[in-house]
């Protein structure tokens, strides 16, 4: 088969011919030797990827927080730690929103600016930054409410006020949201 001028210019610009590598033009899908996957298996694979992605985000967040805490220790204002964690996550190549304004809709009534999420990473992970001596149960309830409103499965409290950063990390699970199982 001769390449059309359009295919030739596509290949010139992208370095790719537009067809599957190593496969004749008429080969597609199952005839190429690919295994057909059931919907259930595809969903399991997607869920496993989602779990892996959120766990990776949490791991990166904890690593960044640890480095900040190790360098500066406890005692600064929450906004300082929030700004530093934001910058560290952005430097890791993540999409992060700081002080994201969240609206709530209840029974058809929209309440604008109902709350602000400290950090919202990759539209997946909500991070509440604290700088208190010890996280209180009300902090976990606050994050849980945010997770319910946003329909997210998992949030993270990072408390830079603790003497050891690892004791200031708290995962908050939303039992009303279906968390993909691994």
Image: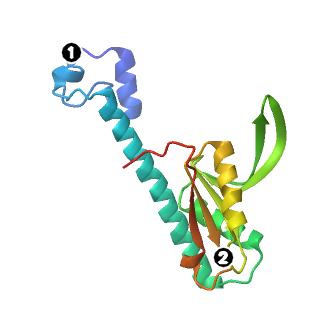
Crowd tier of the residue under label 1, counting other residues whose Cα lies within 10 Å: few below 14, some 14–19, many 20 or above: few
The CA distance from mark 1 to mark 2 is 59 Å
Indicate the quadrant where residue 29 lies.
top left
Image point 33% across, 27% down: which residue? 39
- Asked if residue 125 is positioned above or below residue 135 in the image, the reply reads above
Query: Is 182 positioned to the left or the right of 125 in the image?
Result: left
Image point 77% across, 35% down: which residue? 105
Crowd tier of the residue under label 2, counting other residues whose Cα lies within 10 Å: few below 14, some 14–19, many 20 or above: many
Determine if residue 97 is in view: yes
From the image, tell me which residue sits under label 2.
Answer: 160
Instruction: Residue 27 in the image: state x and y as whole percent.
Output: 20, 19
Mark 1–mark 2 CB contact (< 8 Å): no
Instruction: Residue 149 in the image: state x and y as whole percent.
Output: 69, 43
From the image, tell me which residue sits under label 1.
Answer: 26
Indicate the quadrant where residue 117 lies.
bottom right
Image point 64% across, 49% down: which residue? 147
Query: From the viewer's perspective, is the residue at label 1 or at label 2 nearer?
Result: 2
Q: Nearer the viewer, residue 27 or 9?
A: 27
- Asked if residue 124 is positioned above or below residue 164 in the image, the reply reads above
Q: How many marks?
A: 2
- Chain-order first, disc 1 or disc 2: 1
Secondary structure category for the residue under label 2: loop
Determine if residue 15 is in view: no
Instruction: Residue 69 in the image: state x and y as whole percent.
Output: 61, 80
Query: Is 31 positioned to the left or the right of 100 in the image?
Result: left
Q: Which mark is residue 9?
A: none
- Asked if residue 97 is positioned above or below residue 59 in the image, the reply reads above
Image point 21% across, 13% down: which residue? 1
Indicate the quadrant where residue 166 lies.
bottom right
Instruction: Residue 140 in the image: state x and y as whole percent.
Output: 66, 62
Q: Nearer the viewer, residue 48 or 20?
A: 48
Secondary structure category for the residue under label 1: loop
């Amino acid at each position: 088969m001769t390449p059309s001028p359009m295919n030739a210019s596509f290949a010139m610009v992208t370095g790719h011919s537009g067809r599957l590598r190593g496969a004749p033009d008429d080969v597609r899908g199952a005839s190429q030797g690919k295994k057909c996957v059931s919907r259930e298996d595809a969903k399991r694979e997607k869920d496993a990827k989602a779990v892996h992605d959120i766990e990776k985000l949490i791991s990166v967040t904890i690593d960044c927080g640890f480095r900040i805490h190790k360098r500066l220790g406890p005692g600064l204002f929450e906004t300082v730690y929030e700004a530093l964690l934001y910058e560290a996550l952005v430097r890791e190549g993540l999409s992060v929103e700081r002080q994201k304004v969240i609206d709530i809709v209840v029974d058809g009534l929209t309440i604008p600016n109902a709350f602000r999420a400290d950090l919202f990473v990759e539209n997946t992970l909500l991070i509440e930054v604290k700088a208190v001596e010890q996280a209180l149960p009300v902090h976990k309830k606050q994050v849980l409410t945010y997770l319910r409103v946003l329909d997210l499965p998992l949030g993270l409290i990072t408390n830079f006020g603790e003497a050891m950063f690892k004791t200031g990390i708290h995962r908050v699970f939303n039992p009303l949201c279906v968390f993909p199982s691994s």
